[in-house]
Image: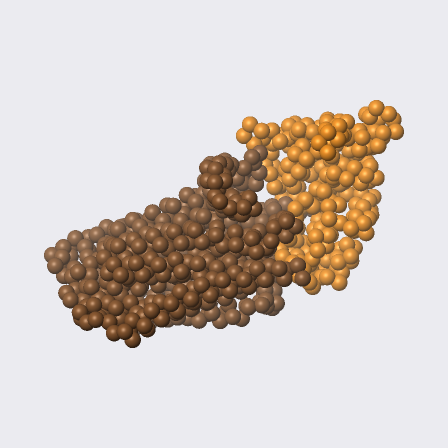
Amino acid sequence: MAFDSAQAKPFPYLLLPSVLASRNRARRRERGDLTRGLMFGAIGILVVGALFQGSFWLTTQLESYEELGDYLLRLGLSWLFMTFLSFLAFSGVVTALSTFFLSEDLRLLLTAPVPVRRLFHARFFRTVGQSSWMVVIFLAPVLMGVGRARCAGLAFYATAVLTTVPFAVIPVAAGSLMTLLLVNTFPARRARDILMLMGLLFAASLVILLRFIRPEQLMRVESLPDLTDFFSTLQSPVTPMLPSFWAGETLFASLRGAPDWLHFSALWLTAGAAVVLTRMANERWYFTGFSRSQEAPKARFTELRALDAVVSVLPWTPVRRQMLVKDLKIFLRDVSQWSQLLLLLALVMVYLYNFRVLDLERIPYMSGFLKNIYAFVNLAMAGFVMATVAVRFVFPAVSAEGAAFWIIRTSPISLRDFLWSKFWTGLVPVLFLTEILTIAGNELLGVDPFLKVMAAIAIVFMSFALVGLAIGMGARYPRFSADPTQVAGSYGGVAFMIQAVLFVIVMIVLLGWPASTYLFQRFRRVPIRTSQELLMIGCFTAAAVLSITVWLTSMRSGVQALNRLSD
Amino acid sequence: MIAIYDLVKTYGKFTAVDGVSLDVKPGEIHGFLGPNGAGKTTTLRMIAGLLKPTAGRIEVNGHDLAKEPEAAKASLGFIPDRPYIYEKLTAGEFLRFHGGLFGLDGNGIGPRVTEMLELFELGRWENELVESFSHGMKQRLVMSAAFLHRPQAVVVDEPMVGLDPRGARLIKDVFRRMAQRGVGILMSTHTLEVAQEMCDRISIILKGKIIARGTVSDIRAMGDGANDHLTEVFLKLTGGSGLQEIDEIV
């Protein structure tokens, strides 16, 4: 058959499978799709509404400061875009690695007579979409809030759309180029290790970004003479050479009704140039990079002998020891798994850093009270971190056995032993992480010793309950053919999150009332009445009983569900 | 139809394919045999355009794969050992998309898709999602995709894995019929009976190098006795069966 490149379909044709797959998925609903849709929809509407209201309120407030308000709004827009710029560049690298090199359908597309340029356009389009949808969802209500507060006309919203497109394209193109470079530089099969590297860089940049702003300075009335310093700190990372500055300037000008063609053109020209440059580099090096990422004589891995040595001395049965070794080695050797944990750790660091700089002492009489309130915020936050870690890393534990689950089912071990082994493997890191988070947070805040002890004990109970719930529900709703991220977002994962959040809220209520009663009475130097004491003990006992019940019943129902698999 | 010259593929210091040359003539079924890790799949994936050769040249239907990749791929059908199919597409949607990649016109593709699905006994599954297919059905779907655009050469890696006897018989018949129409087929397989039954010529690869080539009779003649079964000759050429060690261990 004669074939020339003119016969090849234009690049949107290569996006057809995604479109058809989405349509088919929408037509054939799976169990729990409606619940998941409603839940995510409701959360989405809440978040979008809050962002809109927040930016509307802030812009309205700034308006009362006249020139200073304008200056802060202008700076704020640049900051907003600069934050997204770093996120988009990082997201571009990670997504390009998947869309250009690791995606399985490439094995099909590359055997077809698809010109490299068209493949690039299709993949780049997908990369931009996948990397930036979250930014767009976040940005849209914020800009709408700003526009509404300033009574902006349609031209502002049109400018916002036309600014966001090139603004998203530039960092994603840079990220794709970076990925191409890395895949061609690193030895084959280590492409996924890049994710880890990027995760670390992103985590570090988040922390540095926060250090740069030092928002706590705004709260210090006595530091007002340093306000100029504060503004110069704010101004320092906003360089006119970055697309974030151009985007901010374009939108600010549009808000005032005067188009800024210079920065608008700079955005589009740079976006065009970035795409052309990335495309040229792809035409030159893509196939070499793809080929390198496919095969290698030997995969690089860490032997983790120390792990074998440590586990061998644990007073467990050989079955449980080997299960632990297997789970840990698989987890530690899969960079894409634990690099996500790094991002979470970065957020935890930022969270703790906030406690460190939070200067509650400046509020006379109230500092002690506020500190103790914050102790509960900290406990709730640790609970939510626990739920998030559990849904991503513990809930998929049974599903992670995947196609190899037959090994467990045909081995002479009970499914009860199997599930409890998964429980202990999940419990230790979750407990460790959240205990550190709670103890460090309370320590940095300087809360009452009674609350410190209570929070530390509560975390132990909550960890047992939430890890048990995650393991049990993971066994009840396994998805053996899906990857862990998909498992976390499945019907069972969403159901777990709902129950976990409810559990955390109930625990906070059960612990909050007796603890606040105790502190309040002590603050007023009034002895606690016997009836109050009894109620306090009742609440603490209820919290403990609730945790133990959730833990054990979840595990039992998980074991029953696993046994039913062979029915 | 398919011609490769001095093909080399190295990964660092390891040479997976070491100067392999072979040609598949129109209408020929060429068996590509070798033990696990000998370099068969790497060679086939280079011909399909999935791996870049370190050295050497590949021609498909007279087109140099490195210089005219689209033209070379357009006349080739590839059936991998671990095929990828979009699980959320129906069989019909997948075939129509695949045809489009090879420039098949939108109007003419419908009857061709139906024809191929009927040929591979998947007609009543045209509107079912691929995710509901068994392994054998997926294998047959990939084969219908590979033959959809009427390729002049086909590269197939382990075609019989996961097929029931009826499916295996069907595939053999299709391959024979295609070969009779002039399609050159390069087929790797571990099923030596299949190679013996179907192949006009056989190449045996070991540690990246071709160690034997010829018709089935030529290969069998390389054994100790003229009536040796292909399996015996294959084991002899590639390093023996190690039966004695098995006895000792058992």
Tag count in the figure?
0
Say which residue appears at 67% left-offset and 45% top-offset.
B80
- The answer to whether residue A268 is visible is no
Q: Choose top left, top right, bottom left or bottom right for residue B3.
A: top right
Q: Position of residue B9 (x, y in %)?
A: 60, 32
- The vertical placement of A36 against A403, above or below, is below
Q: Check the image and report above or below for B72 versus A534.
A: above
Residue A94 visible in the displayed image:
yes
Q: Who's the residue at 43% across and 56% down the image? A: A389
In the image, residue B151 lies at what x, y percent?
A: 72, 46
Most extreme residue toward the bottom, as rendered?
A: A531
| Residue A255 placement (x, y as % from top left) | 29, 66
Residue at the image point whose x is 66% and y is 38% from the top: B41
Identify which residue, A274 or A507, lies in the foreground: A507
Image quarter in which the C terminus of chain A is found: bottom right
Q: Colour of chain A?
A: brown
In the rendered image of the structure, the colour used to display chain B is orange
Query: Which residue occupies 44% across, 58% down?
Result: A464
